[in-house]
Image (tube, grey):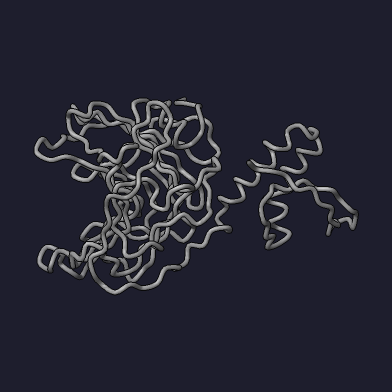
């Protein structure tokens, strides 16, 4: 259980001795600016409203502070790993889920979140690092370096992905027309340094991508795959263009612009019997979701579809290392069930 620590300190501004309630965790204040931004608002509110709301206000401030871009390290942290195939499967499932939820990650309890498999060069590439979402949920850090090819494909593609949802018993979840309508929820934070790319061949002139080995012009940035059907990308689509989310190669109605350094929550609805889909989006600070996209994509009849999450990118990146954070992920039978599981909210759609 969380707890509060009471301490006295001297104000740098007034020189007065002040009493303060702190969340029971080790604190590292980097500057007076951090104090002002992360903690002062909550403590001022406590003074104004009295002790009763202390838990809610201070813990909310702590959760917000954990998600600040300045508290995250988007630099390369993982070691360079020699080439070779590195894939694992039959990982432990998450056995604690809300009613109506068939899959959910649990990054605070399981090092692999509850996914069935992983395709990454080492454990460092996909790992919880203490960062939390703006809802206070444990997030996972994903890092992809040049030549990160855990499937040893030699196809100028790089990745660090978790794959295949599984239920509490460890049974793989694969989608087909028989799956009917399913809801999926997740969230992303792309740091201020994010430079994802999904560029057309024309961006690589004077190379003629139609004549050169086609892998030379590989350029994409998937952060969610319904493998074999579609997915969510986070990238600029023109040279020096804005960073945008697109789903199934279709821009979101609002342009899909990404606010770097802030969380974005998503809920996807896919009716696997028809291929119809809806995407809802909620940016950090908003209460309700809004409908961002609807459409239809044919569902293959001859293969099963499964979810992959992390980062899968084309290898034409100029030697760049990419880092992002992903919040809890859930699959379920209703919007309400996956919203509650992934975000701990019950606000619904506007």
- Determine the residue located farthest toward the front in the rendered image: 169
For the point 37% across and 26% down, the residue is 100
**Is 345 placed left or right of 226 in the picture?**
right
For the point 26% across and 39% down, the residue is 171
Give the image location of residue 85, x and y in percent: 23, 65
Q: Using the rendered view, name the quadrant where residue 333 is placed.
A: top left
Q: Using the rendered view, name the quadrant where residue 216 is placed.
A: bottom left
Position of the N terminus by quadrant: top right
Q: Is 303 above or below relative to 98?
A: below
For the point 15% across and 67% down, the residue is 208
Q: Is 58 above or below relative to 216?
A: above
Give the image location of residue 335, x and y in percent: 39, 27
Q: Using the rendered view, name the quadrant where residue 275 is placed.
A: top left
Looking at this view, is 80 or 312 the one in front? Answer: 80
**Is 20 placed left or right of 173 in the picture?**
right
Give the image location of residue 293, x and y in percent: 33, 33
Residue 254 can be seen, yes or no: no
- Determine the residue located farthest toward the right in the rendered image: 16
For the point 86% across and 50% down, the residue is 18
Number of numbered labels in the structure image:
0
Q: Is 263 above or below relative to 199?
A: above
Residue 267 can be seen, yes or no: yes
Give the image location of residue 156, x and y in percent: 21, 66
């Amino acid at each position: 259980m969380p707890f509060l620590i009471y301490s006295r300190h001297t104000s740098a501004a007034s020189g007065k001795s002040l009493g303060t309630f702190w969340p029971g965790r080790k604190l590292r204040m980097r500057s007076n600016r951090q104090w002002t931004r992360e903690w002062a608002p909550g403590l001022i509110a406590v003074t104004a409203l009295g002790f009763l709301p202390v838990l809610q206000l201070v813990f909310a401030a702590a959760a917000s502070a954990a998600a600040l871009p300045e508290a995250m390290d988007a630099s390369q942290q993982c070691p360079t790993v020699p080439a070779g195939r590195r894939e694992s499967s039959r990982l432990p499932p998450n056995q604690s889920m809300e009613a109506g939820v068939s899959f959910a990650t649990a990054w605070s309890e399981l090092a692999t979140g509850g996914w069935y498999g992983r395709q990454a060069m080492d454990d460092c590439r996909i790992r919880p690092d203490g960062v939390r979402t703006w809802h206070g949920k444990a997030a996972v850090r994903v890092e992809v370096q040049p030549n990160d090819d855990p499937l040893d494909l030699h196809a100028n593609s790089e990745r660090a992905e978790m794959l295949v949802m599984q239920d509490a018993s460890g049974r793989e979840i694969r989608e087909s027309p028989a799956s009917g309508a399913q809801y999926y929820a997740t969230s992303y934070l792309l740091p201020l340094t994010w430079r994802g790319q999904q560029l057309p061949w024309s961006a690589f002139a004077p190379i003629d991508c139609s004549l050169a080995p086609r892998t030379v012009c590989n350029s994409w940035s998937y952060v969610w795959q319904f493998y074999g059907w579609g997915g969510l990308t986070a990238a600029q689509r023109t040279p020096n263009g804005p960073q945008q989310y697109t789903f199934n190669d279709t821009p979101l109605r609002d342009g899909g612009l990404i606010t770097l350094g802030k969380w974005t929550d998503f809920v996807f609805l896919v009716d696997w019997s028809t291929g119809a889909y809806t995407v809802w989006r909620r940016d950090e600070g908003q209460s309700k979701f809004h409908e961002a996209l609807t459409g239809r994509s044919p569902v293959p009849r001859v293969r099963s579809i499964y979810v992959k999450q992390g980062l899968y990118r084309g290898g034409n990146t100029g030697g760049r290392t990419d880092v992002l954070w992903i919040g809890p992920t859930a699959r379920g039978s209703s919007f309400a069930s996956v919203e509650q599981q992934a975000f701990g909210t019950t606000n619904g759609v506007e």
